[in-house]
Amino acid sequence: MKSLLFSLCLYLVFAKVYAQPIVLSSPDTGYPVVGRCEVLDTQAGDISVDSLLKHPERYRFVAVKTQRAERSAGQKRWFRFTVQTPLYTPFYLYAESDLSSPATLYQTYGNRIQDTFSFVKGQNNTAISVPQARSRRLTPLGLKPGNSYTFYWHSAEIPETLTLVSGERLLSVFLRQDSFDGFYYGFVLIIIVYNILLYIRLKDRDHLTYAIWMGIQCLVYSITFAHLRNWLPTIYYSFFLKHFLAVTFLAAAFHILFGITFLQLRQHARRLYQTGLVLFYLCVFLSFIVVAAGVFGMYLPYNAAFLTGLIDLVFTLIGGIAALRKGFKPAWYYVLGILLIYGGTVVYVFTSLKLMPSTFWTTNGLLLGSTLEILLFTLALAYKVNLLKQQKEDAIQDQLRLLEQNQTLIETQNRVLEEKVEQRTAELKASQAQLIQKEKLASLGELTAGIAHEIQNPLNFVNNFAEVSAELTGELKDELTRGDLDEAGFIADDLAQNLTKIAHHGRRASAIVRGMLEHSRMESGDRQTTNLNTLADDYLRLAYQGQRAKDNTFNCRLITAFDPALPPVNVVAQDIGRVLLNLCQNAFYAVQQRATQAGEGDEPTVWVRTRRQNDHIELRVQDNGTGIPDAIRSKIFQPFFTTKPAGEGTGLGLSLSYDIITKGHGGTMTVESQQGEGTAFIVTIPC
């Protein structure tokens, strides 16, 4: 009984001190080494693996969980674990993360070394050449079913992530990790391209700054996790690994710049905006300083990156909170993204320091946080774009409302203006009618003056012959009283001649008065067959006499050339007479002006010609006056346009004449003129 109790106690002691062997019974399970590992309870010193194998009784190994001895940093120790497997499946010794110190692994069987593996800190120590083994510590184990193998690990510590896994499980682990890495970099690349396209389309610098920051941040992570080492090893070792701190400074600089522009700190927090600019330029400057120092072989400690990250965290959080307080809603996404990325950073750092268990999620905490941050920042940008779009639409709606109000106001003003225009038009038409009437009256006045001058001659004859006839009547009475019948007969013959002449000149005056009455009609009369030669001659004489009535010193040579074969035309005689009178008056005015300006020179002359050309009659009134300048020739038929001084013309004479010929009679009126030589008006009337 005592021996049984002693054996039981001895078994419990050894069961507690010595770790159980690791039995690899399933290819789908990973077997952690640390839980089944033993450590030499004394310092390794110069103990060799051969000594451990030849003299195992000299050395006491205890379970890692029971080992509490303090040791100095970097001190090497011996670790031991035993492996058994009933399977023919290949197994591998796999570390999830790189080792923090050099190590050597010995695989032994029956106190003999079968294989040795050496691991150097910070380098890829893959023992097999497969793509999935890049940047990971992977060791193939030659295990046969039924055998028991002892492994000795010589290093300062044994990684907590050191695991025994089958090839099938290892491939699934690698596939999961590679898929996650590929997803991360692919996702970031898509977001970068998307934001560059948005910048090209929208010209919003937030998208460009965001794309640049993501590119630099991906570069930082590819250096941190040694992905760039596998893609571009030469550039990685020659530049990026040496200047990693400079890249982190640039990433922080553009992260701060993105926060400044996205959060609109220039509008929401002016002082934070200025502080952010200072930090941006400072980080860029430090980046160039780090690169320049590296050229001369001087490198700053990597711990400075943590200080830069802390400054970035504090500033961006304060900026996000300030924007939130100003009511900028997209800042919610921004602040949450900042908390997630730095939360992932804390998880990654704690895992690296062995303060948290190493799992797939904790090991990739930094990339997970970065993915969530990029996703939230993208949502924030989309929210901001939609917000700006909504604000723009609201502004457009406000503009449309203002436009509608302005349109209503404009329509009201247009109605008022139309009413005023109609009123002014009516007034202008009335004024125009008055001016036309005035022009007609002025024309009538000119005609009346000429007729008065013309009628004076027959009246003088009538008066003179009447006085002579009265004297002859007295003489006739005296001769009859004396009984001289012969003399009385002579006096009677003279008296009869005088009466004949009085009757002749009376008829002449009556004809002139009748013509004046016909011309003085206010409305156009009916068309009637008219001899255009006679009409032109009469109005030429009347216009000439009217000009002489205004200036008795005026003299002008009148030359007529009337076509004797000219047929009668069906026209409104008084209207054509008004045209002729106006053209002749203008001709006399022009020759008088030239005579006044030039003094002695060509004799003032006015020509009036008529001729038939095919189916129309041409009437030409020409003078050798001052002529019409080319600049105003196209305006002479416009209403109210005149070249005469104020008070001497209304500007309606030629306009009314043009309307009478073109609209009233279907003819044409043109002008030919050369300044200083004279002017000719050509009127055509259909036969």
Image (tube, rainbow, N blue to C red):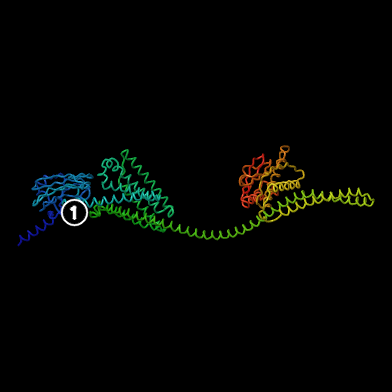
Quadrant of res 560: top right
Question: Residue 572 versus residue 234: which sits nearer the camera?
Answer: 572
* Circle 1 residues within 10 Å: few <14, some 14–19, many ≥20: few
Determine whether the residue tagged by mark 1 lies in a helix, strand or loop: loop
**64 with respect to 597 (left or right):** left
Q: Which residue is label 1 attached to?
A: 68
**331 with respect to 60 (left or right):** right
Question: Residue 5 versus residue 139: which sits nearer the camera?
Answer: 139
The x, y position of residue 82, in whole percent, is: 12, 51
The x, y position of residue 484, in whole percent, is: 93, 49
The x, y position of residue 370, in whole percent, is: 30, 52
**220 with respect to 389 (left or right):** left
Q: Is residue 18 visible?
A: no
Question: Residue 585 versus residue 55: which sits nearer the camera?
Answer: 585
In this rendering, the answer to whether 596 lies above or below 84 is: above
In this rendering, the answer to whether 311 lies above or below 422 is: above
Q: How many marks?
A: 1
The x, y position of residue 637, in whole percent, is: 63, 48
**346 with respect to 680 (left or right):** left
- Could you tell me the amino acid type at mark 1? Arg
User: Which residue is situated farthest in the right direction here?
Assistant: 482
Quadrant placement of the N terminus: bottom left
User: Which residue is situated farthest in the bottom direction here?
Assistant: 1
User: Which residue is situated farthest in the front direction here?
Assistant: 486
Q: Is residue 433 visible?
A: yes
In this rendering, the answer to whether 191 lies above or below 236 is: below
Question: Residue 65 versus residue 571: which sits nearer the camera?
Answer: 571
